Image (spheres, rainbow, N blue to C red):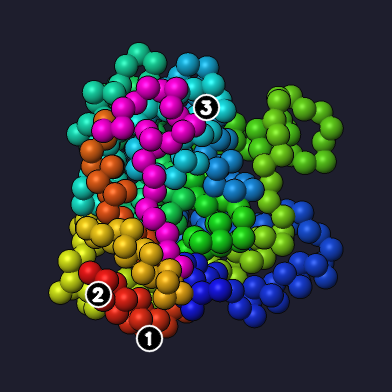
Amino acid sequence: MYKIYQIKPFIGKEEIMNVQDALNDKWITEGNYANEFIEKIKEITKAKYVFLVPNGTLAIYLSLASLDVRQKDEVIIPDFTFNASSSPVRFLGGKPVFVDVNDGDFNIDVSKIEESINVRTKAIMPVHIYGQCCDMSPLLELAEKHGLKVIEDSAEAFGVKYNGKSAGTIGDVGVYSFFADKTVTTGEGGAIVTNDDELALKIKIMRNQGREKSGSFKHPHIGMNFRMTDLQCAVGCAQLDKFNEIRFEKIENFIYYKSLLEDCDVRFIEINKYSTFIPFRVPIRVNKKEKVMDYLEENEVQTRSVFYPLHRQPCWRYLDYKKNDFPVSNNIFNEGICLPVYPGLKDYEIEYICEKIIEVL
């Protein structure tokens, strides 16, 4: 048991009432709440098309499939991200190619992408890490120059904007995750967004057993079931109704951490002018990572490291990367700790966490 947990979903009576309503309606597969959830997502993101899926990983898989990523195709991905960004590429027979990230904002270093492009490269997948967009304009220029598709992994950046455009709607296709630790949660769940008519039709067919409409038993194409339930969407609708409150509290919590640790030997993630920011976690960098984490755990604060670099993951060993190939990604991991930032986190809890960090440093 912990005094302070790493995540705590912002669930209240609104979500419970919606789920009860969905159960009473007895239409618990995609139904009225699914339609409402889609419209609310469209309202926030301004995306032309929204497709619900069971989780963010499958959203990436289906998006890559819609871009015709297949055997021996290569997809460029930042080295510093969760493994779910890369594994769908392999499931489609492709090869993930890793690129180092920026030291300040942890997003993909666009200046290093071109050296990894070759005749097998099919797409670039920027990951908007920890609730902030990567620099999309030069990335899109690079993609256009080489005729590449762009899929935005916006799992941690729902509601975040790059120069006024919603994360996920800037490239060819984008994905969101609604896992329990995300800004908006349905427990498990995700969404795909696109403004491309042709891609939208392919995604629509592939996610619904190879047909455009349910209720038909004639399947012109091969597809699978990537649908969500109305119970999840009922939770999602309630979450989006209080999205502004969630966003405000997370930002306020981040600011409070910075004020309490400003005189301490702690580095915070840098915030760029071209992107808004909704913190997924509060990632900090310290020189005594293991000591800080151990001390927080001893004092009943649940800790998390930042992401383990993809090139060092045991499952990607066959790609023959060397341990020191991506120095920035390595340094961020060696120094990085994630602090909780969820709505409902109390000021005195943030003060307690910061007090323990200062004590050990």
Secondary structure beneath dot 3 equals helix
Q: Amino acid at mark 2?
A: Ile
Q: Residue at x 29, y 23 (%)?
A: 116
Is 48 on the left or on the right of 221, as rendered?
A: left
How far apart are labels 3 and 2 at the CA level? Answer: 43 Å
Q: Taking the image as drawn, is residue 232 in sight?
A: yes
Residue at figure coordinates x 33%, y 82% from the top left: 351
Q: Residue at x 46, y 50 (%)?
A: 155
Q: Residues within 10 Å of mark 3 (few under 14, many from 20)?
A: some
Q: Mark 3 highlights which residue? A: 90
Q: Provide the residue designation for mark 1.
A: 348
Observer able to see residue 252: no
Residue 338 percent coordinates (x, y): 37, 61
Give yes or no for residue 314 being in the magenta stretch: yes
The residue under label 2 is 358
Name which of mark 3 and mark 1 comes first in the sequence.
3
Mark 1 burial class by Cα count in 10 Å: few <14, some 14-19, many 20+: few
Tell me where residue 46 appears, x and y as whole percent: 45, 54
